[in-house]
Amino acid sequence: MKKAKMFLSVALFSAVAFGAFANASKAKTVSTVPGYIKQGLSCVYKNDCSNVPSMVLCTDNNGAQIFDRTDATHCAVDLWKL
């Protein structure tokens, strides 16, 4: 009985430790990407933002939303504040 309790304790501790390391490796890294605003026919660099979703969209000082661009004339991909 004592060996069974010891085995279960070690097994449980190992499972918890493995889970903690597995979750830590899945954590998203914040990466800085350039943000653009559409001006005329092209996208113009405005500020650096993050491509990791959060609660706050990336905006400039006037409150205009800043986007990532798909090419030189299309900027419509959401970005978030750093």
Image (spheres, helix red, strand yellow):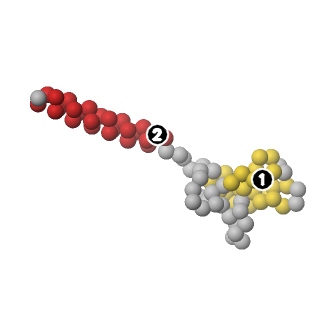
Q: Residues within 10 Å of mark 2 (few under 14, many from 20)?
A: few
Residue 5 in view, yes or no: yes
Question: Residue visible at 81% across and 59% down?
Answer: 38
Where is residue 14, by image quadrant?
Answer: top left
Under tag 1, what secondary structure? strand
Of label 2 and label 1, which has the lower sequence position? 2
> Viewer-proximal residue, 78 or 29?
78
What is the quadrant of the N terminus in the image?
Answer: top left
Residue 68 in view, yes or no: no
Q: Residue furthest bottom?
A: 62
Question: Residue visible at 88% across and 60% down?
Answer: 40
Under tag 2, what secondary structure? helix
Where is residue 65, by image quadrant?
Answer: bottom right
> Viewer-proximal residue, 54 or 35?
54
Residue 69 location, x and y as percent? 76, 50
Residue 71 location, x and y as percent? 80, 46
Q: Which residue is mark 1?
A: 75
Q: Are marks 2 and 1 in contact (CB under 8 Å)?
A: no
Question: Residue visible at 68% across and 64% down?
Answer: 59
Which numbered marker is on residue 1?
none
The Cα–Cα distance between marks 2 and 1, rounded to whole angstroms, is 31 Å
Q: Amino acid at mark 2?
A: Ser
Q: Amino acid at mark 1?
A: Cys
Would residue 80 be found to the left or right of residue 29 on screen? right
Residue 50 location, x and y as percent? 62, 54
Residue 12 location, x and y as percent? 27, 36
Q: Residue furthest left?
A: 2
Q: Which residue is mark 2?
A: 25
